[in-house]
Image: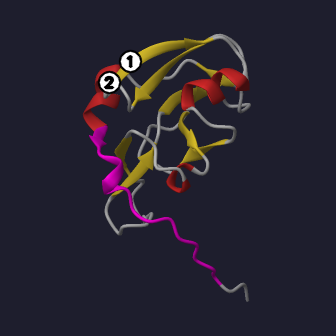
Amino acid sequence: MKKVRAILIDTIQSEVREVVLQGTNRELNELLGCDCFCAATVDIPRGNMLFVDDSGLFHRRKGAFRFPCKPGYHTLDGEPYQTLSGNGIIVGYDDEGDDCHTTVSVEEARSKVKFVSPEDLPDPKFEFYPVS
């Protein structure tokens, strides 16, 4: 990862702010407060992704947030948003899949984020779908 402009969703401070990532996965792990992160399926412009703690719902963090889902996707609690535990980071990506500056503004991210209490998190569950 090269040095890129990103947006941090800080659930401890309940704020959304711009950060500059220096280029390591370790940095993402530290900002997210986790060992393993993944991209969430949320309503965000193409060329951007929201990274979160891959097992966030299994850890009752001190903070959580909601972010709108992509149309047609379901959530654990059946609502049109994802409820995510811990911090989030919005990063851009290019046509080759490399990290780049996000095209999402801090104002746009703030308008989509709703901070919630960890008590509002849905219980984690697994669903199995048969493959035919």
Q: Which residue is mark 1?
A: 17
Quadrant of the snapshot with the C terminus? bottom right
Amino acid marked by disc 1: Arg
Q: CA distance from mark 2 to mark 1?
A: 6 Å
Element under disc 1: strand
Q: Is residue 48 left or right of residue 15?
A: right
**Residue drawn at (31%, 28%) of the image:** 14
User: What span is colored magenta in the figure?
Assistant: 113-129
Q: Is residue 49 left or right of residue 26?
A: left
Please name whichever residue, 98 or 15, is drawn nearer the observer in this view of the structure.
15
Residue 101, quarter of the rendered image: top right
**In this rendering, which labeled residue sits more in front, label 2 or label 1?**
2
Queried whether the magenta region covers residue 14, the answer comes back as no
Q: Main secondary structure of the magenta part?
A: loop
Residue 15 is tagged as: 2
Amino acid marked by disc 2: Glu
Are the residues at dot 2 and dot 1 in contact (C-beta closer than 8 Å)? yes
Q: Label 1 crowding class (10 Å Cα cut-off): few <14, some 14-19, many 20+?
A: some
Residue 98 is tagged as: none
Q: Is residue 98 left or right of residue 53?
A: right
Element under disc 2: strand
Q: Position of residue 8 (x, y in %)?
A: 45, 24
**Residue drawn at (38%, 39%) of the image:** 63
Compared to 94, does 53 lie above or below?
A: below
